[in-house]
Image: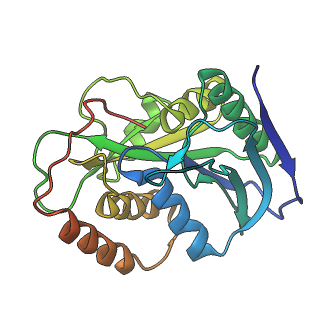
Amino acid sequence: MISVDFIQKSEPTVSKPLLIAAMQDMGDVGSIVIDFINSNLNTSIFREVQPSYPAYVIDHGGYIDVPEDKWDYRSAKDIIVFGGGSGQPSSTEELNVLCHDVINVAKKYSTRFIYTFGGFHTQKPIDGEPKTFITTTSKDLTDQVRKLGILTTPEASIITGFNGLILGFAKMNGIQGIGLYAELNEPKIPQYRSAKSILKTLEKLTYRKFGDTSDLDSMAKDVESRSRGKRFDPDQSYSA
């Protein structure tokens, strides 16, 4: 049985907004970007999504807690932001229901463009700042984006999870969409530099600023200093 509750709290004041939607993925990239945008644009919640049953429990070392997962739709001037937080739906059926809801919200408020993002896992050591690659819902749109000097995904692949599937739902419903996926080597630790790379590319695509990213640099340095010398078992998959 599919159990997802949708709670409409208010009606946002938006006119043909951009819709930005992403959930937690490898390196927490999707949720880092969403949480950054919400904080810097001072967005307001207008709709909530609550799974009726948890997909996991948290072991604190001798006792467990049940997480209270929920995902928010938030809005600011001419923008709707969905996702962030922790986790993704626990089943393919719930994931499809959630993607349908995002598309329904996009149609309700006359959204014409959806952006999503996540991590692009690579075994190749990253030289300098991570690169962000894009893929789109049409070849024509990809050609337009390339003219901006933005890199496209380098090879064919399968993108799993919300941060890829939502592009498919957008395409099936006649809505243009772009996915932004930033390089990362270690998918099991937060990747703040990858999130920053996505934000800078998103600003270039949307012609709008999302805030000062210097805090992301500081958080990246903190994570890197704490993880130095530790070894991780990187996930072999690429995606969202």
Q: Quadrant of the C terminus?
A: top left
Q: Residue at x 81, y 39 (%)?
A: 5
Q: How far across and how far down the image is residue 99, in percent?
A: 66, 33
Colour pattern: rainbow
Position of 149 compared to 55: left or right? left
Q: Residue at x 51, y 68 (%)?
A: 36
Using the rendered view, name the quadrant where residue 123 is placed.
top left
Q: Residue at x 47, y 55 (%)?
A: 60
Depth order, front residue of 18/239: 239
Position of 152 compared to 209: left or right? left
Is 150 rendered above or below residue 195? above
Q: How far across and how far down the image is residue 202, in percent?
A: 45, 58
Q: How far across and how far down the image is residue 8, in percent?
A: 87, 51
Using the rendered view, name the quadrant where residue 74 is placed.
bottom right
Depth order, front residue of 128/229: 229
Using the rendered view, name the quadrant where residue 170 is placed.
top right
Q: Residue at x 34, y 63 (%)?
A: 192
